[in-house]
Amino acid sequence: MYRRPLQSAVRSLVHGAATRAAGRQTSDQNACLARALGTLQLARVSSACSPPCRTLHISTQLCNVKETPQHTEEEVGAFTKIIEAIGFTGPLKYNKWKIKIAALRMYTCCVERINYDDFFEQCALPDTLNSWFLVAQLHVWMCLVRMRQEGRAGKYMCRYIVHSMWEDVEQRSKIMGIDAMHRKEAMKAMTETFYAAIFGYDEGILSDDSVLAAALWRNLFNRDCEDPKQLELMVEYVRKQMQSIDALDGEDLLLTGEVKWRPLVEENAQSILKVATPTYNDAGL
């Protein structure tokens, strides 16, 4: 007899607890929903007042371009930064005199290891001092691009490459018998041409072939070229030379300055894009 009232009491107690728990759960859900709606309205108001954000373009395709290691910036102290801001050069990784000698040797490679007759013939350039200078500054620029990747020592070397170039140009003009007044005017014009060409070539090497061809047309051909094959030849020449010089070791360039240039015309130009594979004999050696 006593079991039924006890069971009914337990059932009513359990039912009441469940009802209260369900009520609390419902109230909690309603509170969460209210907070979510408030946050959403606040986000809409803030997004309407704030400027639109850029759209992120996500691509799952992998690039086939070979990644080259990035050169880390050389850490220098506060004193070195101060003296370099004044105009002096702080301590470098290598001896400064060795870098100067390497810079002179690199410039020598730009003027002694280039067949200028091929450029005069293939590009229809007149055999003059100005044409020689235009071809020389193209190769000097390629060396400057490569050495700027070698940190502070490379930039220090660039200064003496340019210094050697101007001394050589002045000596050649004296040998040709140009008087002092005309030589000064010619040097001023060449200086303006050189720094304008650097900006144009830098833009061209970082862009597509059409931009590089335009830079060569303005600077090397002096806006006087109607043959597209000549521009195509020079664009291919600059691309393959930059690929070749970029593969050279930076420390060897800082210490030796030795640069070997590819010929202007090659029978198999596609070979510059292929890595040379080793040859083996029948024994596998």
Image (spheres, rainbow, N blue to C red):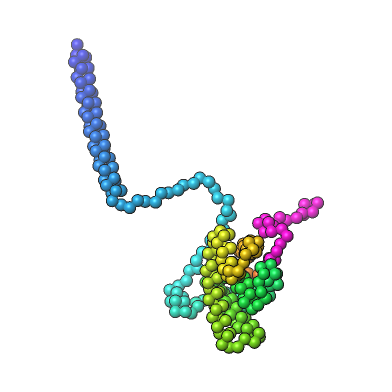
Of residue 89 and residue 39, the one placed in the foreground of this image is 39
Residue at point 53% right, 73% down? 195
Q: Is residue 53 above or below residue 37?
A: below
Image quadrant containing the C terminus: bottom right
Of residue 126 and residue 8, the one placed in the foreground of this image is 126
Residue at point 55% right, 74% down? 193
Q: Is residue 201 above or below residue 19?
A: below
Quarter assignment of residue 153: bottom right
Residue at point 60% right, 69% down? 224
Image quadrant containing the N terminus: top left
Q: Position of residue 194 (x, y in %)?
A: 55, 74
Report how many numbered discs are placed on residues in the image: 0
Quarter assignment of residue 169: bottom right
Q: Position of residue 160 (x, y in %)?
A: 57, 77
Q: Magenta span has 182? A: no
Of residue 232 and residue 12, the one placed in the foreground of this image is 232
Main SS class of the magenta portion in the image: loop
The span picked out in magenta is 260-285
Residue at point 48% right, 79% down? 88
Q: Position of residue 268 (x, y in %)?
A: 71, 58
**Taking 197 as reference, is 274 left or right?**
right
**Taking 236 as reference, is 70 left or right?**
left
Q: Position of residue 100 (x, y in %)?
A: 59, 78
Quarter assignment of residue 220: bottom right
